[in-house]
Amino acid sequence: MTTVTVRGAGIFGLSVAWFCLKAGARVRVVDPAGVAAGASGGLVGALSPHSPDRWSEVKAFQLRSLVAARTFWPEVDAVTGLRSGYGPVPRVRPLPDADAVARARELAREAARNWGEAGAWTLVEADDWAPSATGLAVRDTLSARLHPARATLSLAEALRRCGVEIVPEARDEGAVVWAAGHAGLADLSRRRAREAGRGIKGQAATLGFDARGFPQVQADGIYIVPHEDATVGVGSTTERDWTTPEPDAQLDEVITRARAICPALAGAPVLRRWAGIRPRARSRAPMLGTWPDRPGHYVANGGFKIGFGVAVEVGRLMADLVVRNRDAIPTPFRVEASL
């Protein structure tokens, strides 16, 4: 039986652990800070695809993962009895002008070609939830949502119920998968004497508003995601330079912009403020594969803004590599691309 040590109890580490377990490995997860202590403990949870044009390996990878999530998260929740908050909630994007409308029509054709039956990209009339200057919006049905922190906790509990230890410290045994977030990127950079990536601060908030039945919204760089517990997640910032990992005044601007996009949120109270340091690889794509010059060690890092959206496929491919010795990782995602 293959033995695997996964270092990191965020979404990448736990997804890798799950698929290694499914592949027949004996797995232990190690994280001194605990489950969802880093970027995976967020509040927004938009699982949204890239633009459907200029199709690439990266976009195809994301598409496969978004489709696989439709069965993955219900399976995890069935094991635990917990709620990940997963749901196939469409995304709307208000169209501000005629150029945006014309572009949206072009992208509808690209979505039909590249998404197939996995999801639709259509123009619809905007409504009072997310009004637009043109009266039109794009609606896509490939998008979904979950609650990041709760989803991570549900997956961790599913692993425990299947016999996987999640501990603060333990020695390495067998193959070692490093899924240690921005700290892991910093460690890789030190060992290679070249920046492999960095931590980017993101901030988000939970508002007290019951928008169940409404779509999630993307506009002006902001995501607005209705959750099943009658709250709304809004975020986030992208801060390359930051002095504190805690929420600060920049989050106030995010909340203000979210209320301008969705006027119904104007009086909604702020229930929680959150900030986290998200790992972005130098290539800006997830960093997956063998750790150069460290036999038996592997890297699964760099989820940045799309970590939850690609986590299912990341876990599957890493388990294939670590347990079955089958390397099908796309070239743009390989560790070498960020070194």
Image (tube, helix red, strand yellow):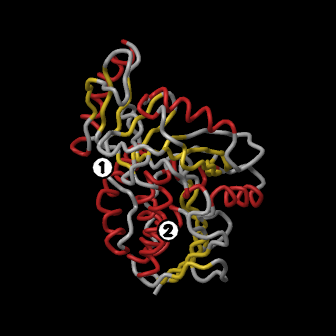
Q: Is residue 198 visible?
A: no
Q: Earlier in the sequence, mark 2 or mark 1?
A: 2
The kind of residue on which mark 1 rests is Pro
Residue, x 37% and y 28% (percent of image)?
130
Examine the image and state in which quarter residue 201 appears: top right
Residue, x 45% and y 58% (percent of image)?
311
Task: From this view, report whether residue 168 is shown above or below residue 119.
Answer: below
Q: Nearer the viewer, mark 2 or mark 1?
A: 1
Q: Specify the farthest residue to the top.
A: 98
Rounded to the nearest whole Å, what is the CA distance between mark 2 and mark 1? 22 Å
Examine the image and state in which quarter residue 296 appears: bottom right
The location of residue 34, given as percent across then percent down, is 61, 70
Residue at which label 2 appears: 14
Q: Residues within 10 Å of mark 2 (few under 14, many from 20)?
A: many
The kind of residue on which mark 2 rests is Leu
Q: In what element is the residue under mark 1?
A: loop
Q: Specify the farthest residue to the left.
A: 117
Residue at which label 1 appears: 88
Task: From this view, report whether residue 339 is shown above or below residue 221.
Answer: below
- Numbered circles on residues, count: 2
The location of residue 15, given as percent across then percent down, is 46, 66
The location of residue 89, given as percent across then percent down, is 32, 45
Task: From this view, report whether residue 84 is shown above or below residue 200.
Answer: below
Q: Specify the farthest residue to the bottom.
A: 1
Residue, x 65% and y 45% (percent of image)?
200
**Residue 30's disc number:** none
Is 305 left, or right, of 37 in this rendering? left
Q: Residues within 10 Å of mark 1 (few under 14, many from 20)?
A: some
Residue, x 38% and y 74% (percent of image)?
80
